[in-house]
Amino acid sequence: MTRTMLTSFVSGCFAILVACGGEGPVEMTSTPAPVTRPSPAATARYRVTFEATWDSTSHPTDFPSNAHFSGLIGGTHRGTVSFWQDAGLATEGIRLMAERGRQTPLDIEVDAAMRAGHAQHLLVGSDVPSSPGSTSLEFDVSVDYPLVTLVTMVAPSPDWFVGVSGLNLLESGDWADRTVDLHPWDAGTDSGVSYRSADRVTAPPQAIHRLTGAPVDVGGTVPSMGRFVFRRLR
Ligand SMILES: [Ca+2]
């Protein structure tokens, strides 16, 4: 093979490679492997269990004798709405959930989102009257509304809460089981510094932020106060 022939041969191969790459499977003679992309069921049913682990061992500083969590409240929704987020200001519903453990008016905010087409189901669960303890709640989700927001007040506390915001139960194209460790948030509406601090309105309100330092930290890190375990039932 002369140099010219070799160059021509290599150039031809290169041209074929480019052509094959550019035209895709049209020229392929073997049967292409099917693309395995799970197609999620249109709806799924879940049970979420709130496993509250907050106790005098996990958070020894000033642990209150009546430690508990308020009734779960939240909703299933799509990405066009958020009921709370890191660095955002608390709505009245989030404020009263975090300060008083109330499910209203956060439920009204979810209802409004449902009427506007942003949310699908209101989630209302029971409390954990004494921590450690647990409670669970069943709910439906759909491919159009695969996100879950669910919160509960750390009680007693000024304005501290745990929960998730817009947790996506669709993972890699299918309904997934999820376990989420819950670290406390500060709603930014009450400036109390300990579990039993008297009410002290934060004016102007601060953004929602991670709660750090005493009394919830242990040696500078804040252990989780529990977890949400999401299990698909069907
Ligand atoms: Ca606060």
Image (tube, grey):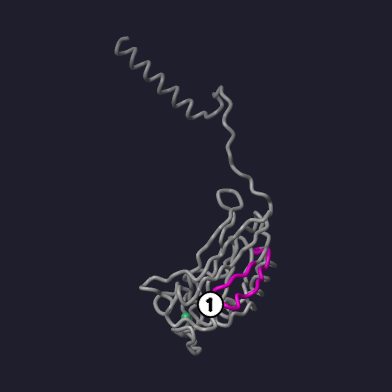
Look at the numbered disc 1 and give the secondary structure of its residue: strand
Would you say residue 167 sits in the magenta stretch? Answer: no
Look at 67% across and 68% down and name the residue there. 122
- Check the image and name the residue furthest to the bottom: 198
Question: Image check: 195 left or right of 79?
Answer: left
Would you say residue 122 sits in the magenta stretch? Answer: yes
Foreground of the two, 16 or 62: 62
Indicate if the residue with disc 1 has its beta carbon within 8 Å of ligand 1: no
Q: Is residue 224 above or below residue 70?
A: above
Question: Image check: 232 left or right of 213?
Answer: right
Residue 137: where, in percent of width, then height? 65, 66
The residue beneath circle 1 is 154
> Residue 228 lies in what quarter of the image?
bottom right
- Check the image and name the residue furthest to the top: 1
Q: Please give the range of residues in magenta.
A: 118-136
Look at 62% across and 70% down and name the residue there. 135
Look at 60% across and 77% down and name the residue there. 70
Q: Is residue 139 above or below residue 68?
A: above
Looking at the picture, which amino acid does disc 1 mark?
Val
> Residue 79 lies in what quarter of the image?
bottom right
Residue 65: where, in percent of width, then height? 52, 84
Crowdedness near tag 1: few (<14), some (14–19) or many (≥20) residues, C-alpha within 10 Å: many
> Residue 38 lies in what quarter of the image?
top right
Foreground of the two, 49 or 193: 49
Residue 90: where, in percent of width, then height? 53, 76
